[in-house]
């Protein structure tokens, strides 16, 4: 029989999440609506990132960029500022959110009562923005908490350990636009079909290889590392057990580095060092969502002290060291930290 030229049964992200939600009797479609607004934000940012070189969208925020300004002299915003505004507006207008924490905003946004819903979203609208100007992959990272009862929301409602998230994901703006999502029952990847404007399921049930052949870290910080991090990287390069040395891959864009780690296996580290004792990455909207996805894919995420998802953040922009990736590889790192104690 003839091979099919076109796939005709398209599993869009909306259809996928609706299917998942109907398995939950308490669900009234609120999560699907929220997700649709996140997806809209991702599509907007994807389109803006793709046009950035062309449209000179990359002028400084608040500055009038003569070349980039349109005929009305409209100010052009930097892509990360623009992305943040788009997400905030999309999330508020969904009518399903109550607290928003963005890497771009010092303070959390409390949604006004008339538009309030039960979900809180923590996000980095455009992570890795130092990579924009040279066309390297960047991404949006998000995590979602749910208000347990209908009390007046307070900041404590987002200062929750990552294991309390109900969903997490990222969207990578790379050679294609890929959205990876977990609602706590595994990890699935969707790719934007630009002609349809829809995310289609392309990576069902992602599982990270149990052990990997790659490590990923900014080695420029090596002189300031602690003992276990230094020992681990030394082992990657000069293994003493006869196993082959690992390959180093480091893009410097968390979404891209984590995406590769999820698909190919291995480790991604942003450890503590003498200059930054808490590492660089932010707990709420970088460490937690990626750790949630790693565990859901069968991997692990560790802070150097504890399971990353057990951390209880005290401040919304708090940082933590992070070691995440293949199950066996993170076991090795945990053993090195345990030996230190
Ligand atoms: P940003 O939020 O300022 O873009 O910084 C976060 C990025 C991550 O995407 C990436 O993993 C990390 O910074 C790279 O840091 P470094 O340049 O120190 O290696
Ligand atoms: Mg960031």
Image (spheres, rainbow, N blue to C red):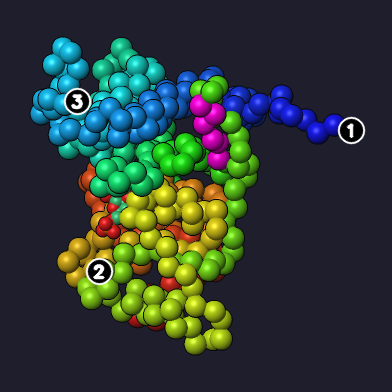
- Residue 68: give its label: 3
265 up-or-down from 3: above or below: below
- Residue 1: give its label: 1
Q: Residues within 10 Å of mark 2 (few under 14, many from 20)?
A: some
- Please give the range of residues in magenta: 189-194
CA gap between label 2 and label 1 equals 58 Å
Residue 41 visible here:
no
Residue at 51%, 23% in the rendered image: 197
CA gap between label 3 and label 2 equals 37 Å
Q: Quadrant of residue 16?
A: top right
- In-front residue for pair 192/279: 192
Residue 238 visible here:
yes
- In-front residue for pair 96/123: 123
Residue at 63%, 41% in the rendered image: 204
Mark 2 = which residue?
A: 221
Residue at 31%, 69% in the rendered image: 219
88 up-or-down from 202: above or below: above
């Amino acid at each position: 029989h003839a091979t099919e030229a076109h796939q005709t049964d398209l599993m869009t992200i909306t259809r996928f999440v609706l299917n998942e939600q109907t398995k939950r009797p308490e669900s009234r479609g609120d999560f699907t609506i929220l997700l649709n607004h996140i997806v809209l934000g991702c599509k907007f940012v994807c389109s803006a990132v793709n046009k950035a070189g062309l449209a000179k969208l990359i002028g400084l925020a608040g500055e009038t960029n003569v070349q980039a300004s349109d005929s009305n002299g409209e100010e052009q915003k930097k892509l990360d500022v623009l992305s943040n505004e788009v997400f905030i507006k999309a999330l508020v207008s969904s009518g399903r959110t109550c607290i928003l924490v963005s890497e771009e905003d010092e303070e959390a946004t409390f949604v006004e009562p008339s538009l309030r819903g039960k979900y809180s979203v923590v996000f980095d609208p455009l992570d890795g923005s130092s990579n924009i100007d040279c066309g390297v992959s960047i991404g949006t990272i998000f995590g979602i908490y749910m208000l347990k009862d209908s009390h007046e929301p307070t900041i404590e409602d987002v200062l929750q350990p990552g294991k309390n998230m109900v969903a997490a994901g990222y969207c990578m703006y790379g050679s294609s636009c890929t959205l990876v999502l977990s609602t706590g029952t595994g990890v699935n990847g969707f790719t934007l079909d630009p002609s349809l404007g829809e995310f289609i399921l392309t990576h069902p049930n992602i599982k990270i290889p149990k052990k990997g052949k790659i490590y990923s870290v900014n080695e420029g910080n090596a002189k300031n590392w602690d003992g276990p991090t230094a020992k681990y990287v030394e082992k990657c390069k000069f293994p003493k057990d006869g196993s082959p040395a690992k390959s180093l891959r480091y893009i410097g864009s968390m979404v891209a580095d984590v995406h590769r780690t999820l698909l190919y296996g291995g480790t991604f580290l942003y450890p503590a060092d003498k200059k930054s004792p808490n590492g660089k990455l932010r707990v709420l909207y970088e460490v937690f969502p990626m750790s949630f996805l790693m565990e859901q894919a069968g991997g692990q995420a560790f802070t150097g002290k504890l399971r990353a998802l057990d951390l209880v953040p005290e401040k919304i922009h708090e940082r933590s060291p992070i070691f995440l990736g293949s199950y066996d590889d993170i076991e090795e790192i945990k053993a090195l930290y345990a030996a230190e104690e």
